[in-house]
Each structure stands twice: as C-alpha cells, then as structure tokens.
Image: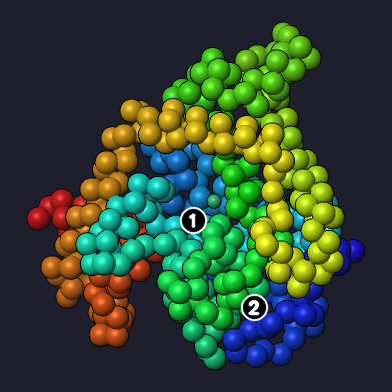
C-alpha cells in the first residue's frame, strides 16, 4: 500500500524514448533491473569504498556498500509507505558515478579538471553514464531510465542552482525531489558510518576505546551491550552496539520524516515537491550524534596516517595518467578518440578515468607511466 505522498509509477513522467510496457514488471522495477545489468554497476565490485583489497577480503567495497544502502533504504521506504521499487533503483545507482580509489580518486580527478576550468561531480557523471555511456539497446544510447530515476540520481545528495546548471533544466531544480530520492543520502550515511566503524576497527586503525570516547551514540549502545553480554567477546559486544546504533538511526529517520510530513501537510508527491525544504530528516538530537560520528570518522579514519600512503598513491596514479593522456591523446582507446572530436579532451579523459576500476587504472599506470 503506497502512502498518498509516494511516487506512483503510473504517474511517472516517463522515459526519453517511449517503450512498450512490460507484461509483468513496472517501469521502476525495469529501471532497477537495468541498473543491476549495467557495466557501471558491475565495476563497483572493484572500486574502493574506504579500504583497498590490500587490507582484507572482509571489508566493504563500493558494490557491497551499495547493497547495504539498498537494504536499509528498502526497509525505511516500506515503513513510510514509499515506492520501494523506485527507492531500490536509486539506491543501487547512487554510487555508479564514483571514480576508482574512493574519495582520494575523486579529489585528484576534480583537481585535474579544475586546471581546465572544469570539475568532476559524481552525480553528474552518473547521469552521463545512464544517459550516454551504457550501450545495451539498439534503439537508443544509455539505459533510457524514467524521469524520476534520472532526477533522483542528480538530486539525491545535493541541490543544483538552476543558473549554474542550465543543462539540468528539465529536472525541476527549484523543487524537492520525491521522498524516495530524499532518503538516499541519509541511508547512505547510516550505511557507511556503521560500516566504516566496523571496518576501521577490524583493520585495527580504530580502537574500541577511541570509538567509545569519540562516538557518543556508539558508547550509549556499547554500555547496553556490556550489561546484556558481560562475558561475550569484545568484537561481539562491538557488533551488538553497532547493530543498535544502525537501528536507532533508521527508526529515528522513519519517525522524524513521518512527523515532518504530518507537520508539512503534504498529501501528494506534488505537495512534497513544493515544500520549502526537504522532509526526509533525522531528529535534531540524532542528527547531532550523526555529525559527531562523521567528524570522528574523518579525523580518525579517512584522514588517518595509516591510510595516507594509499591515498597519496591513488592521487598520484590519477594525476599522472590524466597528464599522460593529455599529452598522448593517440594512446586513448578508439571510442574515446572519437568522443574527443566532439568534446574537450580533458572531459573525455575524465570520463575514461572515472569509469575505471582500481585494478584497471593501476594496470594502465604501470603500463603507460611507471615504465616510461
Ligand atoms: Mg554511497
């Protein structure tokens, strides 16, 4: 049963190229399936989330992170009466625009582009992937996704100023996206905050004492877990605390979003779109704890000494390869040389690098730069 404010597939603004209806899959289900069957989705398996494979096979990569985001998003969407098919399509697509090597790769690619007065934005790149780069159908380029999925890919994590992005005009930039898209950025944070505490602890970069001191929400639940399971192994008490922390954020997000919906008076998707601000939200208390967790992870994990060597190597690989192809465009694959006839070379190189997996870009670097 869909809530009145949910996105309804029969009211979708539809696809760019009209297609006949499928016998038993609706358009959002088909979009979800198209994302899963895309090349960009498969490549997530070999893209760094936080830790490269050098650390351990147990840790998240961008694919398993994506699956965790989809799982959490489905739970929340079902509880709110939202369109679970649309939410799942958006969750599965939310990271397909990410370059290799996680944040370090993104930073280096953006810096390389800024030298040409351009930039790299993973949401805009994801849109280019689903609109243009995926070649699966004879009748059109791209995946021909419905409007709401393309809109959600753009707007799930930020608002774009209509004046600065005329090419996004069709995406109703002055309006909120549907709640199904508003959820994604928040479930993404729930997923990676808990997962990164877990992997950081397993990697022995974060100690239990540090986490207990620096993450008050974790500490509250760790005290509970200790009271319940006094004799249990530390890691199992850690898991119990983390599980409760995840559940606390999910339940808070559901309750707070329901309360904001009720207060807003929005009773339709049009009402959600027209609200002065986004309605999906944590409560102020949990949001403060979420921010503390995020600050802790930035300081103690993402910018830790332990991860610094890998990050500088990642930045070096991206920067040097970008430069190499700027100087040797003839070394690009034929399809990219062709694209360079229509678009600036730096944009073409950026697209090429952004699509790469960690393994592939390292191999290219060894072959083209490291041996030169
Ligand atoms: Mg993510």
Q: Quadrant of the N terminus?
A: bottom right
- As drawn, is 85 to the left or to the right of 309? right
Q: Which residue is mark 1?
A: 44
Tag 1 secondary structure = helix
Which mark, residue 9?
none
Q: Position of residue 175 (x, y in %)?
A: 64, 70
Tag 2 secondary structure = loop
Which residue is drawn at the image coordinates 71% and 56% (left, top)?
A: 279
Q: Position of residue 85 (x, y in %)?
A: 74, 65
Residue lying furthest front in this view?
A: 276
- As drawn, is 370 to the left or to the right of 190? left
Disc 2 Cβ-to-ligand 1 distance below 8 Å:
no
Q: Nearer the viewer, residue 367 or 120?
A: 120
**Whether residue 136 can be seen here:** no
Which residue is drawn at the image coordinates 75% and 17% (left, top)?
A: 224
Q: Position of residue 127 (x, y in %)?
A: 50, 71
Residue lying furthest right in this view?
A: 1
Q: In the rendered view, would you say 106 is above or below 238? A: below
Q: Which residue is mark 2?
A: 146
**Whether residue 311 can be seen here:** yes
Within 10 Å of the Cα at label 2, are there few (<14), some (14-19), or many (20+) other Cα atoms?
Answer: many
């Amino acid at each position: 049963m869909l809530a009145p404010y949910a996105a309804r597939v029969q009211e979708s603004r539809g696809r760019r190229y009209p297609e006949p209806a499928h016998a038993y899959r609706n358009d959002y289900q088909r979009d979800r399936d198209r994302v899963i069957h895309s090349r960009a989705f498969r490549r997530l398996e070999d893209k760094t989330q936080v830790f490269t494979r050098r650390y351990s096979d147990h840790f998240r990569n961008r694919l398993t992170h994506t699956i965790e985001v989809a799982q959490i998003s489905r739970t929340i969407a079902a509880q709110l009466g939202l369109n679970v098919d649309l939410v799942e399509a958006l969750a599965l697509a939310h990271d397909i625009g990410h370059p290799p090597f996680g944040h370090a790769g993104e930073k280096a690619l953006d810096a390389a582009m800024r030298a040409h007065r351009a930039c790299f934005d993973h949401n805009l790149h994801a849109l280019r992937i689903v609109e243009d780069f995926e070649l699966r159908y004879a009748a059109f380029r791209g995946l021909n996704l419905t409007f709401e999925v393309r809109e959600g890919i753009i707007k799930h994590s930020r608002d774009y100023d209509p004046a600065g992005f005329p090419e996004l005009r069709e995406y109703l930039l002055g309006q909120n996206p549907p709640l199904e898209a508003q959820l994604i950025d928040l479930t993404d944070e729930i997923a990676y905050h808990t997962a990164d505490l877990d992997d950081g602890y397993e990697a022995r970069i974060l100690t239990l004492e540090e986490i207990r001191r620096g993450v008050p929400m974790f500490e509250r639940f760790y005290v509970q877990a200790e009271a319940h399971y006094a004799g249990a192994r530390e890691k199992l008490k850690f898991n119990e605390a983390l599980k409760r922390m995840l559940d606390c954020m999910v339940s808070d997000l559901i309750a707070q979003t329901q309360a904001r919906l009720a207060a807003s008076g929005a009773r339709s998707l049009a009402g959600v779109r027209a609200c002065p601000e986004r309605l999906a939200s944590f409560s102020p208390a949990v949001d403060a704890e979420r921010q503390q967790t995020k600050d802790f992870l930035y300081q103690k994990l993402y910018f830790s000494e332990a991860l610094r060597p890998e990050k500088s190597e990642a930045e070096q690989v991206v920067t040097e390869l970008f430069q190499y192809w700027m100087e040797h465009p003839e070394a690009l694959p034929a399809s990219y040389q062709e694209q360079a006839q229509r678009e600036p070379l730096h944009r073409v190189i950026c697209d090429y690098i952004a699509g790469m997996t960690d393994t592939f870009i390292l191999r290219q670097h060894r072959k083209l730069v490291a041996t030169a």
